[in-house]
Amino acid sequence: MKVQNIKDVNKFFEVVDSCAGKVELVTGEGDRLNLKSKLSQYVSLANIFSNGEIQELEIVAYEKEDIDKLLNFMING
């Protein structure tokens, strides 16, 4: 799923941490970072904010309930 305009990054990572399965960030080069890893969270944040803006992120979740959680966050915050 493609996401934009994450205003509450802490809440976003809380939702990611609560997911049962794997949640990955797909980089522009096609690499996949495990967003449940704190190190990957910090690395991804550094890369996302290095130019001061978030254009678009691609997130991959494998469990239906995790996809529902992430969609709910994107819709309702």
Image: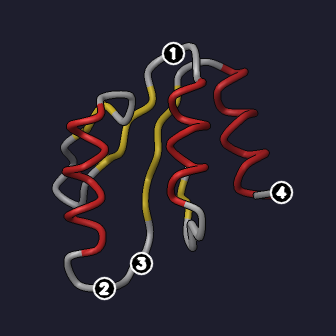
Looking at the picture, which amino acid does disc 1 mark?
Gly
Q: Which mark is residue 55?
A: 3
Residue with the mark numbered 4: 76
- Rounded to the nearest angstrom, the CA distance separating label 4 from label 1 is 22 Å
Residue with the mark numbered 2: 52
Residue with the mark numbered 1: 21
Against 13, is 65 above or below? Answer: above
Residue drawn 53% across the image and 57% down it: 2
- Rounded to the nearest angstrom, the CA distance separating label 3 from label 4 is 20 Å
Q: Secondary structure at mark 1?
A: loop
Against 20, is 31 above or below? Answer: below
Residue drawn 66% across the image and 41% down it: 70
Where does the image place residue 20, in percent across and percent down from the top left? 57, 14
- The image quadrant that residue 63 belongs to is top right
Q: Earlier in the sequence, mark 4 or mark 1?
A: 1
- The image quadrant that residue 6 belongs to is bottom right
Looking at the picture, which amino acid does disc 3 mark?
Gln
Looking at the picture, which amino acid does disc 2 mark?
Gly
Q: Nearer the viewer, residue 18 or 22?
A: 18
Q: Secondary structure at mark 2?
A: loop
Say few, some or many: other residues with alpha carbon within 10 Å of mark 1 (under 14 / 14 to 19 / 20 or more).
some
- Rounded to the nearest angstrom, the CA distance separating label 2 from label 3 is 10 Å
